[in-house]
Amino acid sequence: MFEKKRHVRIAAESWVEDPEDAHVDVVVTFPDATTWIADFYTYKCIESIREDHKVKGHGLNGAYWAASKVVLVDRVTRERIEQIVDELIEKGTFSYAFEYLGAVNEHALQTYGYPADFFDENAKMDPSYVKWFAANLVQMLEQTDHETRTAVLKEFLDIFGEKERNRRGDL
């Protein structure tokens, strides 16, 4: 599903003072121009958050802390993060740890220093992942009102209708 060729961007990487007590956002981009995000927290950082919650009364006085797509690590360094990303890809568990963020946009192309030959115009997102998301969308649409279903269907028809007209050269 995911290939070894990847670009790893670590937000606030230069701000990390103590690699064993830190957290950073990690964005991974693949040659198919998809981007994926997860938050990396050290074990020590989680304990610091818990202690802070106890003092300030947050999260039932430190009884819980909720987050999505969190990877717990021993230290926040580029080397460790890249090791973890590579292992998640190799073991086929990357999509469990990272959340799909979207396609690379023009701002990202100009800002994040992708290598010149990084992107593959012929690469497409893994069909099994797209089908999984589509199945989830169908389930969600079944649980919503007619107005919402109609609006989503219209958006799909607009997108696919425009692409078909472009393919035929009608525009």
Image (spheres, rainbow, N blue to C red):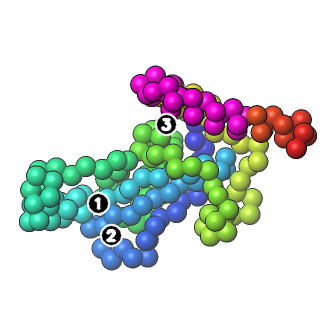
Instruction: Give, as a single range, the part of the protein colored magenta.
Output: 138-160
Residue placed at 33% from the left, 77% from the top?
A: 17
**Residue 154 % position (x, y):** 64, 33
> Residue 42 has which mark?
1
Residue placed at 46% from the left, 46% from the top?
A: 99
Query: What type is the residue that disc 1 sits on?
Result: Thr
Q: Earlier in the sequence, mark 1 or mark 3?
A: 1
Q: Is residue 119 visible?
A: yes
Q: Quadrant of the N terminus?
A: top right
Secondary structure at badge 1 equals strand
Q: Within the magenta stretch, is there residue 29?
A: no
> Residue 14 has which mark?
none
- Assess disc 1: are there few (<14), some (14-19) or many (≥20) residues with their C-alpha within 10 Å of its C-alpha: many
Residue of label 2: 19
Residue 30 relative to residue 141: left or right: right
> Residue 92 has which mark?
3
Secondary structure at badge 3 equals loop
Query: What type is the residue that disc 3 sits on?
Result: Gly
**Residue 82 % position (x, y):** 48, 57
Above-or-below relation of 9 to 30: below
Chief secondary structure of the magenta portion: helix
Verify CB contact (< 8 Å) between mark 1 and mark 2: yes
Query: What type is the residue that disc 2 sits on?
Result: Pro
Secondary structure at badge 2 equals loop
Residue 161: which quarter of the image? top right
Q: Within the magenta stretch, is there residue 149?
A: yes
- CA gap between label 1 and label 2 equals 8 Å
